[in-house]
Amino acid sequence: MHRTGMTELEVVLAVARRRSFRGAALALGMSTTAVSSAVAGLEARLKVRLFNRSTRSVALTDAGQLYVARIAPALAEIQSAGEEALTGASVPSGTLRINAPQGAAFLLLESLFSPYTQRYPQVRIDIVSEPRMIDIVAEGFDAGIRLAESVPQDMIAVPLSRDTRMLVVASPDYLKRHGTPRHPRDLLKHQSIGMRMSHGGIYHWELKRNGQKLQMDLPVRLALNEMSAIRQAVLLGLGIGFISEWFIQEELASGALVPVLSAWCPSFGGLRLYYAGRRFVPARLRALIDLIHELELATR
């Protein structure tokens, strides 16, 4: 039986997560040569290639993807156990890594992350915002944040917010100039501000009422990939937008944005913090979960 060292496993995971031998070397405090040698040595003992390499990119092979998916949870358990033995299970410390969609960190900065950092000064928070869904365990995150409907079924989910809605909104000036749509089909006469998805396509608005579901493919005047930019474009009167009510509470209250077709915009499950149901939950993550329950964020 071949014996594989912990360092080699850490190196493989670092290269897989950063898709770079140099990036992994910087993260681990090793030389690029040492990282390359560790990977090559492991591949030789396993008798399988884990990475496809070129002068411009590094990517996992199919065998490499299976290998990383198996070792990542086990290595995370070992690292968590070591941290607990070193610091004590009741002392949150280290780096709390969270993967979240764009905008979620902004929404939770004041209500959650600010009080957390004040209460646990020994913890460093590293939030990576991106639209794509990832395997948080394989890529080394303690937890993820997504809408309830997007949380993987094998994860434990903690409510972070109340249910919400996507609202069709426009500025008063825009509605004065172009009229107010009374039915979803009226939207076809309007210009929309589109959301550019990570796969390159434009998000299709989904409207529902009394069991009837409509997917709207509207004329797009401007396409953007950030909700804050879409909000600004709608405020400027450039078109009608489809925006989460989280992002426009102040604008709705002040009348700067006006909701239309509200009956066609039902609520859905809000944000959830999710994590793997493993035996050892790091103290830093347990502290965050406890704070979420204490603050009762899902009821606000």
Image (cartoon, rainbow, N blue to C red):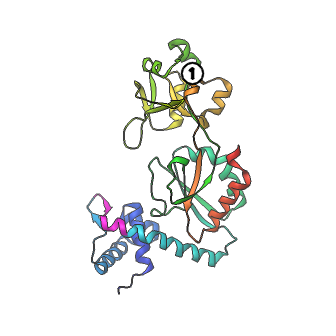
Q: Total marks drawn?
A: 1
Amino acid type indicated by mark 1: Ser
* Residue positioned 65% across, 52% down in the render: 113
What element does badge 1 sit on?
A: loop
* Residue 96 vertical position relative to residue 167 in the rendered view, above or below: below
- Give, as a single range, the part of the protein colored magenta: 56-66
* Picture coordinates of residue 57, whole percent (x, y): 30, 58
- Image quadrant in which you'd find residue 253: top right
Q: Residue visible at 51% across and 34% down? A: 229
Identify the residue at the far front of this view. Answer: 211
Q: Is residue 97 above or below residue 129?
A: below
Residue 84 percent location from the top left of the image: 62, 75
The one nearer the camera, 114 or 62, is 62
Tell me, yes or no, whether the highlighted magenta stretch contains residue 233.
Answer: no
Please tell me whether residue 64 belongs to the stretch shown in magenta. yes
Question: Residue 1 placed where, x, y %?
Answer: 35, 87
Which image quarter holds the C terminus? top right
Q: Is residue 61 visible?
A: no
Residue at image mark 1: 171
